[in-house]
């Protein structure tokens, strides 16, 4: 059973999965119960901000440039390197361009602050 109450700062294993890595039953449940689009775009953006993608997949999806605006590089992402300084900033500390990039990646002020729970210990690439 999928319970929204179990989602907390990316702690649910389900949240970290890309849409098409889930079985059809899970995808159907998420579509019917929570209204996610069947193409998975909403899920991958709003639930994990594409962090489950490899860099090449983000390039193909057209979102790698927004991670670059936040200071990430392909090398950092693919090799589990420590994240850029932007990942340790509060929402209000982000530059206008960093905030705009974060918004395209489906971050809001509250989701950015929630995800900082990952950054407080030295945010590293989610692809490790």
Image (cartoon, rainbow, N blue to C red):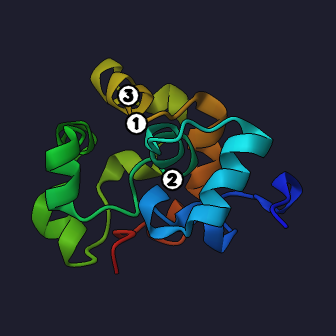
87 sits left or right of 7 in the view? left
6 or 37, nearer to the observer: 37
Q: Are marks 3 and 2 in contact (CB under 8 Å)?
A: no
Q: Which residue is mark 3?
A: 104
Can you give x and y, in whole percent of width and height, for residue 50 in the image?
A: 39, 51
Q: How far apart in space, not on screen, are marks 1 and 3 (Cα)?
A: 4 Å
Q: Quadrant of the N terminus?
A: bottom right
Q: Residues within 10 Å of mark 2 (few under 14, many from 20)?
A: many
Can you give x and y, in whole percent of width and height, for residue 99 in the image?
40, 26
Look at the image and tell me whether residue 77 can be seen. yes
Q: Residue at x 66, y 43 (%)?
A: 31
Please determine whether, in this image, residue 114 is positioned above or below residue 100: below
Q: Position of residue 81 (x, y in %)?
A: 25, 74
Q: How many marks?
A: 3
Q: Earlier in the sequence, mark 3 or mark 2?
A: 2
Contact (Cβ within 8 Å) of mark 1 with mark 3:
yes
**What is the quadrant of residue 67 in the picture?**
top left
Residue that carries the numbered disc 1 in the rendered image: 105
Labelled disc at residue 48? 2
Name the residue: 48% across, 57% down: 19
Label 3 – label 2 distance at C-alpha: 13 Å
Secondary element under disc 1, as helix, strand or loop, is loop
The Cα atoms of the two marked residues, 2 and 1, are separated by 9 Å
Residue 33 pos. (x, y %): 79, 44
Left or right? Give the position of 66 relative to 104. Answer: left
Element marked by disc 2: loop
């Amino acid at each position: 059973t999928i319970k929204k109450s179990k989602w907390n700062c990316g702690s649910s294993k389900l949240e970290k999965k890309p849409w098409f890595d889930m079985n059809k039953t899970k995808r159907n449940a998420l579509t019917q119960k929570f209204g996610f689009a069947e193409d998975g775009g909403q899920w991958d953006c709003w639930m994990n901000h594409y962090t489950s993608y490899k860099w090449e997949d983000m390039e193909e999806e057209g979102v790698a440039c927004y991670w670059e605006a936040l200071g990430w590089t392909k090398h950092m992402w693919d090799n589990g390197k420590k994240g850029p300084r932007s990942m340790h900033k509060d929402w209000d500390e982000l530059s206008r361009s960093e905030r705009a990039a974060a918004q395209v990646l489906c971050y809001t002020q509250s989701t950015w602050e929630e995800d900082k729970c990952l950054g407080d210990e030295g945010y590293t690439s989610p692809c490790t």
